[in-house]
């Protein structure tokens, strides 16, 4: 049950969201659905039509009355998170409230976490990752990552904490770890933001390097390379001085002078370096099983992609498991 204070705070947040959505849109106001669709389903239709502000406005009005609709909160948070991400990719329009959209997303995801703990928690992590992106663009990589974020702001499920640690220890000291999929970004960044694990690693988001000029400039400075280089050439330049690791969801990048080889859970290239001997563990993955969390299946897919590139990984992953039922990693069961 929500306390009266929490409900009041929630209502005020929703009203602020609705006001922003209405003010940002010049489209015709949308009435409550009367066609058999729920408010969330109608919002999804509007969103798919490109009417983002209308979708957010509809959900805001709906949630002001139905505050326990976890799916409504979750989709509203996704809309604002997506808008905040577009703000970066479309040039940081000074007339658009990019950071404020991210705060609205965080508020909605916090409500979603209370009602839909699994999905809401991971997307709160992604909101924290986007906040870190804002800090990187403002202050640079070192300053933005020097101070850990409180753990309660990054509520990463343990199965993804374990995945993030496994990916990070797969990359040698002073390496660059390039992430691709949502599960990779959430797990690696979630661990990195809240702890002192592997402060030597530079985390590079492949999805942003080509699309966001500010981000590319800051990360190029952190790597000591020319910011005018495209991602393959940037990886090639960085690889002359330090090891570069590609997450399992990324295919080999044709970086000049870099030859890739499977190493533990990553593709490893660039400057030679000793591989970390820290054991990879899947205790959380084994304990939860595929029915335990929607994110267990996402973690399984990352392990599977890694094992397809490196068959020796199967023996390493299962070398020290407990007595529970092992969740199937397809590449390891053939």
Image (cartoon, rainbow, N blue to C red):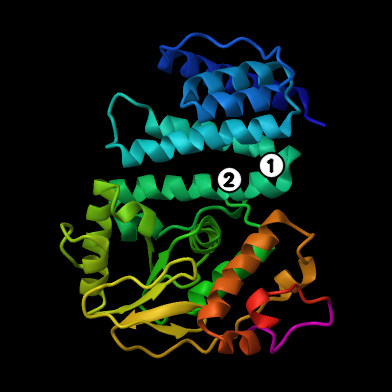
| Image quarter of residue 171 | bottom left
In whole angstroms, how far apart are the C-alphas of marks 1 and 2? 8 Å
Mark 1–mark 2 CB contact (< 8 Å):
yes
Q: Residue at x 69, y 42 (%)?
A: 113
Q: Is residue 119 left or right of residue 264?
A: right
Residue 21, placed above or below residue 199: above
Q: Position of residue 324 (x, y in %)?
A: 84, 77
Closer to the camera, 267 or 319?
267
Label disc, if present, on residue 113 of the rendered structure = 1
Does residue 153 show up?
no
Q: Is residue 216 left or right of residue 295?
A: left
The quarter of the rendered structure image containing the C terminus is bottom right
Q: Is residue 107 left or right of residue 130?
A: right
Q: Residue at x 67, y 57 (%)?
A: 295
Q: Is residue 328 left or right of residue 164?
A: right
Residue behind mark 2: 124
Q: Residues within 10 Å of mark 2 (few under 14, many from 20)?
A: many
The quarter of the rendered structure image containing the N terminus is top right
Closer to the camera, 50 or 75?
50
Q: Earlier in the sequence, mark 1 or mark 2?
A: 1
Q: Position of residue 184 (x, y in %)?
A: 52, 62
| Image quarter of residue 56 | top right
Residue 251, placed above or below residue 317: above
Asked if the stretch drawn in magenta spans residue 56, the answer is no
What range of the chain is rendered magenta?
A: 317-324
Residue 232, placed above or below residue 306: above
Q: Position of residue 155 (x, y in %)?
A: 63, 52
Main SS, magenta region, reads loop
């Amino acid at each position: 049950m929500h306390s009266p204070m929490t409900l009041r705070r929630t209502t005020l947040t929703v009203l602020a969201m609705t006001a922003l959505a209405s003010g940002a849109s010049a489209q015709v106001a949308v009435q409550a659905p009367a066609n058999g669709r729920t408010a969330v389903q109608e919002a999804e239709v509007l969103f798919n039509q490109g009417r983002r502000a209308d979708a957010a406005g509809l959900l805001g009005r709906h949630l002001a009355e139905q505050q326990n609709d976890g799916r409504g909160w979750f989709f509203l948070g996704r809309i604002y998170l997506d808008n905040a991400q577009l703000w970066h990719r479309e040039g940081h329009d000074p007339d658009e409230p990019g950071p404020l959209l991210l705060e609205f997303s965080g508020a909605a995801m916090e409500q979603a976490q209370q009602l839909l703990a699994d999905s809401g928690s991971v997307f709160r992590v992604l909101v924290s990752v986007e906040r870190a992106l804002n800090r990187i663009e403002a202050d640079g990589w070192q300053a933005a990552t020097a101070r850990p974020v409180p753990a309660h702001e990054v509520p990463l499920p343990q199965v993804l904490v374990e995945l993030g640690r496994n990916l990070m220890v797969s990359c040698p000291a002073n390496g660059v770890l390039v992430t691709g999929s949502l599960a990779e970004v959430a797990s690696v960044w979630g661990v990195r933001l809240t702890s002192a694990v592997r402060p030597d690693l530079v985390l590079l988001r492949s999805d942003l390097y080509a699309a966001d000029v500010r981000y590319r400039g800051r990360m190029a400075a952190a790597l000591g390379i020319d910011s005018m280089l495209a991602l393959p050439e940037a990886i090639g330049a960085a690889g002359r001085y330090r090891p570069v690791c590609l997450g399992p969801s990324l295919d080999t990048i044709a970086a000049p002078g870099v030859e890739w080889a499977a190493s533990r859970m990553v593709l490893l290239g660039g400057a030679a370096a000793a591989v970390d001997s820290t054991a990879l563990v899947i205790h959380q993955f084994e304990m939860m099983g595929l029915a335990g969390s929607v994110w267990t299946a996402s973690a399984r897919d990352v392990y599977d992609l890694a094992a397809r590139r490196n068959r020796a990984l199967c023996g390493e992953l299962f070398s020290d498991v407990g007595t529970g039922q092992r969740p199937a990693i397809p590449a390891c069961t053939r």
